């Protein structure tokens, strides 16, 4: 395993633990990260582009997942974490189902963003790499992010403006 990757993960774990206001701030930051990704996605005409539009790769590279990833290191077992983990998601248009694998909302969104970011880095030169439908994958990511935002938005602890 690459030492830079391991050190990066440890740095993010440390950042997650160092947040002074605790769990509430952690989930607010997760909410903001999801909103930033959604806002960024809304700047692109994803549904009107072709499935391999080069602009989609630029969008993919800009997606963030630091706080989604760090949520897996949360050992507080909060009600919010349970809602995010126990929530199942069925995507309207699924390109890559793994037989027998059911993932929860948080895991699914994390894996989809991580995978699409890696795929965007790969240059197709031969025939081994399947044609990737970035449009469908981004639509699924957006659907998952919207569901996370909805769950977090319903929690008074995570929303600054709720009374």
Image (tube, helix red, strand yellow):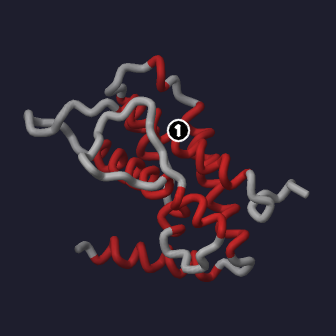
Q: Position of residue 118 (x, y in %)?
A: 30, 50
The image shows residue 71, relative to residue 35, as above or below, that is: below
Residue at 53%, 28% (x, y): give it.
Answer: 44
Name the residue carrying label 1: 143
The image shows residue 101, relative to residue 46, as above or below, that is: below
Judge left or right: residue 144 versus residue 50. right
Residue at 36%, 26% (x, y): give it.
Answer: 53
Q: Position of residue 113 (x, y in %)?
A: 42, 49
Q: Position of residue 33 (x, y in %)?
A: 60, 54
Could you tell me which quadrant the N terminus lies in? bottom left
- Front position in the image: 150 or 26: 150
Residue at 65%, 55% (x, y): give it.
Answer: 31
Q: Which residue appears farthest toward the left when viewing the image?
A: 127
How would you rate the neighbour count of disc 1 (Cα within 10 Å): few for under 14, some for 14-19, many for 20 or more?
Answer: some
Say how many tags the image has.
1
Report helix, strand or loop for mark 1.
helix
Judge left or right: residue 138 versus residue 28. left
Residue at 62%, 59% (x, y): give it.
Answer: 30
Q: Which residue appears farthest toward the top when viewing the image?
A: 48
Q: Position of residue 147 (x, y in %)?
A: 59, 45
Q: Quadrant of residue 39?
A: top right
Could you tell me which quadrant the C terminus lies in? bottom right
Judge left or right: residue 30 versus residue 138. right
Judge left or right: residue 45 versus residue 123. right
The image shows residue 118, relative to residue 44, as above or below, that is: below
- Front position in the image: 105 or 122: 105
Q: Which residue appears farthest toward the right when viewing the image?
A: 163
Q: Quadrant of residue 57?
A: top left
């Amino acid at each position: 395993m690459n030492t830079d990757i391991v050190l990066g993960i440890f740095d993010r774990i440390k950042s997650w633990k160092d947040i002074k206001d605790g769990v509430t701030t952690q989930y607010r930051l997760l909410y903001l990260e999801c909103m930033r990704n959604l806002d960024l996605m809304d700047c692109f005409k994803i549904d009107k582009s072709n499935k391999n539009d080069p602009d989609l790769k630029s969008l993919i590279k800009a997606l963030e997942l630091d706080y989604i990833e760090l949520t897996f290191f949360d050992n507080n077992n909060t009600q919010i974490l349970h809602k995010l983990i126990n929530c199942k998601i069925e995507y309207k248009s699924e390109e890559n189902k793994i037989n027998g694998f059911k993932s929860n909302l948080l895991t699914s969104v994390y894996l989809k963003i991580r995978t699409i970011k890696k795929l965007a880095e790969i240059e197709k030169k031969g025939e081994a790499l399947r044609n990737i439908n970035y449009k469908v994958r981004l639509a699924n990511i957006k659907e998952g992010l919207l569901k996370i935002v909805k769950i977090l938005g319903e929690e008074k602890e995570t929303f600054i403006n709720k009374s």
